[in-house]
Amino acid sequence: MTVSPAGAVKHDDPGLARCEAAARRLLLSHAYKGRKRFCPRCRGGKVYALADGRLRCAACRYTFHELTGRFVNVGGLSCRDWLRLTRLFAAEATASHMAEELGLAYNTVYRAVTVIRFAIVASAPDAAQILFGETGRAMGYDDGRIAMSRGTDAEGQIPVFGIIERPDWTFVDLVPDMRVEHVVHFNLNFSLKVARLGKVVYTDRYQHYDALMFCGGDDSRRYADILDRTPFLDSRTGGFWRFAQSRLRRYNGVSARRFPLYLKELEFRYNHRKDDILPILLAYLCNLVPKREQSDLF
Ligand SMILES: [Zn+2]
């Protein structure tokens, strides 16, 4: 146990597990929630331990570790580093600050933070729609595998999200079949107000949405032809957009491709703004990385 100079010891802070074994126990408690071990491939409950500590499924013969197939198993971090990194992520530390604080390479931290964001998306109610569709593929999600290349250009269509604001919560909804070209068309021909924050383009109210929103990447300037009007979101004094705006400014390097990850992270942070999000994030990270054929099991 370490004691800080101020003498304060936080026994209940899951980000400060004293050793790897304690960190691992904590993650396993999130992964299995008191249940018996089960197979991450077929979900069979008949599992036996091998001499080397691994487990084998009696039904499908799959051999695995206790954290195999879970987000926390992606990225090569120790359990203790996951806890420390997730704690910093919860506190909204930048990736470079995390790298310095944890003594990890920037790219390692960037990958881990991307994994956390995917874990957030995977726990959203619209996870299957996002991850198993065109948007998921463009983000680098391939049926349970996460490609980490840091491409800046969106591949394929740029996803358009609809923002629904309610007094206490928000929903960031991937709008099926909505294309950037439609937004431009509504702007040019139906005077739908459009504004821009960096690369992020957003509109006035549209149907039941309080705004449509997308990341135009480096092309975003050409989408905003009517800049002297105020879309609905900007007319509000509080709410999700105010919360998101200041944070999006900090994500100045956000790519069109990974923008959905940031937007869903902001939705999560906003909806949990009164909660301690660290245990929630740890639970998400310990979930199985969803695969299409198993998506009905979630
Ligand atoms: Zn199995």
Image (cartoon, rainbow, N blue to C red):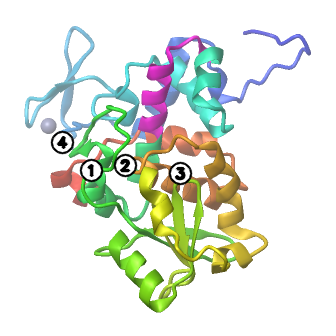
292 left or right, relative to 8: left
Amino acid under disc 3 = Glu
Foreground mark, 2 or 4, reads 2
Left or right side of 278 for 190: left
**Separation of disc 2 and disc 4 at Cα?**
36 Å
Q: Amino acid at mark 2?
A: Arg
Q: Determine whether the residue tagged by mark 2 lies in a helix, strand or loop.
A: loop
Residue under numbered circle 2: 257
Taking the image as drawn, is residue 237 in sight?
yes
Determine the secondary structure under disc 4. Answer: loop
- Residue 1, picture quadrant: top right
Q: Is residue 245 above or below residue 239?
A: above
Q: Is mark 1 within 8 Å of ligand 1?
A: no
**Mark with earlier residue (2, 4):** 4
Establish whether ligand 1 lies closer than 8 Å to the Cβ of label 4.
yes
Residue 136 position (above or below residue 169): above
Q: Which residue is mark 3?
A: 265
Foreground label between 3 and 2: 2
Q: Quadrant of residue 140?
A: top left
Mark 3 and mark 2 in contact? Answer it, CB < 8 Å: no
Along the polypeptide, which appears first: circle 1 or circle 3? 1
Tag 1 residue? 155
Answer few, some or many: residues within 10 Å of disc 4's Cα (few below 14, many 20 plus, some between 14 and 19).
Answer: some
Decide whether residue 11 is among the magenta residues: no
